[in-house]
Amino acid sequence: MTNFSELYERLKQEQVSLNNELRRLKAEEKSADEQREGSPFGKREEGASEAFEWEKRLALERRLTDALAEVEHALKKYEAGTYGICDLCGRPIEP
Protein backbone atom coordinates (compact mmCIF):
# COMPACT_ATOMS: atom_id res chain seq x y z
CA MET A 1 0.00 0.00 0.00
CA THR A 2 1.23 3.47 -0.88
CA ASN A 3 1.92 5.86 1.97
CA PHE A 4 0.51 9.09 0.52
CA SER A 5 1.48 11.28 3.48
CA GLU A 6 5.14 10.27 3.04
CA LEU A 7 4.88 10.93 -0.67
CA TYR A 8 3.31 14.32 0.03
CA GLU A 9 6.25 15.28 2.26
CA ARG A 10 8.71 14.21 -0.43
CA LEU A 11 6.83 16.33 -2.97
CA LYS A 12 6.94 19.33 -0.62
CA GLN A 13 10.70 18.85 -0.19
CA GLU A 14 11.14 18.62 -3.96
CA GLN A 15 9.10 21.79 -4.40
CA VAL A 16 11.40 23.67 -2.00
CA SER A 17 14.49 22.25 -3.70
CA LEU A 18 13.31 23.22 -7.19
CA ASN A 19 12.34 26.72 -6.05
CA ASN A 20 15.77 27.18 -4.44
CA GLU A 21 17.53 25.97 -7.58
CA LEU A 22 15.50 28.34 -9.76
CA ARG A 23 16.32 31.27 -7.45
CA ARG A 24 20.02 30.37 -7.55
CA LEU A 25 19.98 30.13 -11.33
CA LYS A 26 18.25 33.50 -11.69
CA ALA A 27 20.73 35.10 -9.27
CA GLU A 28 23.62 33.73 -11.34
CA GLU A 29 22.01 35.09 -14.49
CA LYS A 30 21.58 38.53 -12.92
CA SER A 31 25.21 38.51 -11.79
CA ALA A 32 26.40 37.53 -15.28
CA ASP A 33 24.27 40.29 -16.83
CA GLU A 34 25.76 42.86 -14.45
CA GLN A 35 29.30 41.77 -15.31
CA ARG A 36 28.60 42.15 -19.04
CA GLU A 37 27.13 45.65 -18.74
CA GLY A 38 30.47 47.40 -18.40
CA SER A 39 32.37 45.65 -21.19
CA PRO A 40 31.37 45.28 -24.83
CA PHE A 41 32.08 41.99 -26.57
CA GLY A 42 35.68 42.06 -27.71
CA LYS A 43 35.81 38.90 -29.76
CA ARG A 44 33.37 36.80 -31.69
CA GLU A 45 34.42 33.73 -29.72
CA GLU A 46 33.48 35.41 -26.45
CA GLY A 47 30.06 36.27 -27.83
CA ALA A 48 29.53 32.72 -29.06
CA SER A 49 30.64 31.30 -25.72
CA GLU A 50 28.30 33.61 -23.82
CA ALA A 51 25.43 32.69 -26.15
CA PHE A 52 26.12 29.00 -25.59
CA GLU A 53 26.16 29.45 -21.80
CA TRP A 54 22.97 31.50 -21.97
CA GLU A 55 21.23 28.74 -23.99
CA LYS A 56 22.37 26.10 -21.48
CA ARG A 57 21.10 28.19 -18.57
CA LEU A 58 17.80 28.80 -20.37
CA ALA A 59 17.35 25.05 -21.04
CA LEU A 60 18.09 24.23 -17.39
CA GLU A 61 15.65 26.88 -16.22
CA ARG A 62 12.98 25.40 -18.51
CA ARG A 63 13.57 21.87 -17.15
CA LEU A 64 13.40 23.12 -13.56
CA THR A 65 10.24 25.13 -14.28
CA ASP A 66 8.58 22.11 -15.93
CA ALA A 67 9.55 19.83 -13.03
CA LEU A 68 8.22 22.38 -10.53
CA ALA A 69 4.91 22.56 -12.42
CA GLU A 70 4.59 18.76 -12.27
CA VAL A 71 5.33 18.70 -8.53
CA GLU A 72 2.85 21.50 -7.86
CA HIS A 73 0.20 19.69 -9.93
CA ALA A 74 0.75 16.54 -7.85
CA LEU A 75 0.51 18.56 -4.62
CA LYS A 76 -2.77 20.15 -5.73
CA LYS A 77 -4.18 16.73 -6.60
CA TYR A 78 -3.13 15.44 -3.16
CA GLU A 79 -4.74 18.40 -1.41
CA ALA A 80 -7.94 17.94 -3.47
CA GLY A 81 -8.03 14.24 -2.61
CA THR A 82 -7.54 13.16 -6.21
CA TYR A 83 -3.91 12.07 -6.08
CA GLY A 84 -3.57 8.62 -7.63
CA ILE A 85 -6.49 9.22 -10.00
CA CYS A 86 -5.75 9.55 -13.73
CA ASP A 87 -6.45 13.05 -15.09
CA LEU A 88 -7.57 11.62 -18.43
CA CYS A 89 -9.80 8.67 -17.59
CA GLY A 90 -10.59 9.19 -13.89
CA ARG A 91 -9.52 5.68 -12.90
CA PRO A 92 -7.15 4.86 -10.04
CA ILE A 93 -3.51 4.61 -11.05
CA GLU A 94 -1.92 1.29 -10.12
CA PRO A 95 1.13 1.75 -7.82
Image (spheres, rainbow, N blue to C red):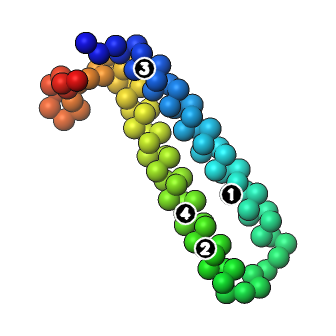
For the residues labelled 2 and 4, the Cα–Cα distance comes to 9 Å
- Give x and y (percent) for residue 53: 61, 67
- As shown in the figure, which amino acid type bears the numbered disc 2? Ala
Mark 1 / mark 2, whichever is N-terminal? 1
Q: Secondary structure at mark 4?
A: helix
Q: Quadrant of residue 74?
A: top left
Residue beneath disc 1: 29
Q: Is disc 2 placed on a helix, strand or loop? A: helix
Q: Is residue 15 above or below residue 32?
A: above
**Residue at mark 4 to residue at mark 3: CA–CA distance:** 31 Å
Left or right? Give the position of 12 relative to 38. left
| Among the two numbered marks 1 and 4 on one chain, the one whose residue lies closer to the N terminus | 1
* Quadrant holding the N terminus: top left
Q: Residue at x 75, y 81 (%)?
A: 41
Residue behind mark 4: 56
Q: Are marks 4 and 3 in contact (CB under 8 Å)?
A: no
Q: Amino acid at mark 4?
A: Lys
Which residue is rendered at x = 40% and y = 20% of the image?
7
Residue type (three-letter) at the residue carrying disc 1: Glu
Eye-nearest disc, 1 or 4: 4
What type is the residue that disc 3 sits on?
Tyr
Relative to residue 7, is residue 53 drawn left or right?
right
Dots 1 and 4: beta carbons under 8 Å? no
Which circle's residue, 4 or 3, is located before the other in the chain? 3
Residue 39 at x, y = what percent?
82, 76
Q: Earlier in the sequence, mark 2 or mark 4?
A: 2
Q: Which residue is mark 3?
A: 8
Q: Which residue is mark 2?
A: 51
Left or right: 2, with 24 as reference point:
left
Mark 2 Cα shell of 10 Å, populated few (<14), some (14-19), many (≥20): few
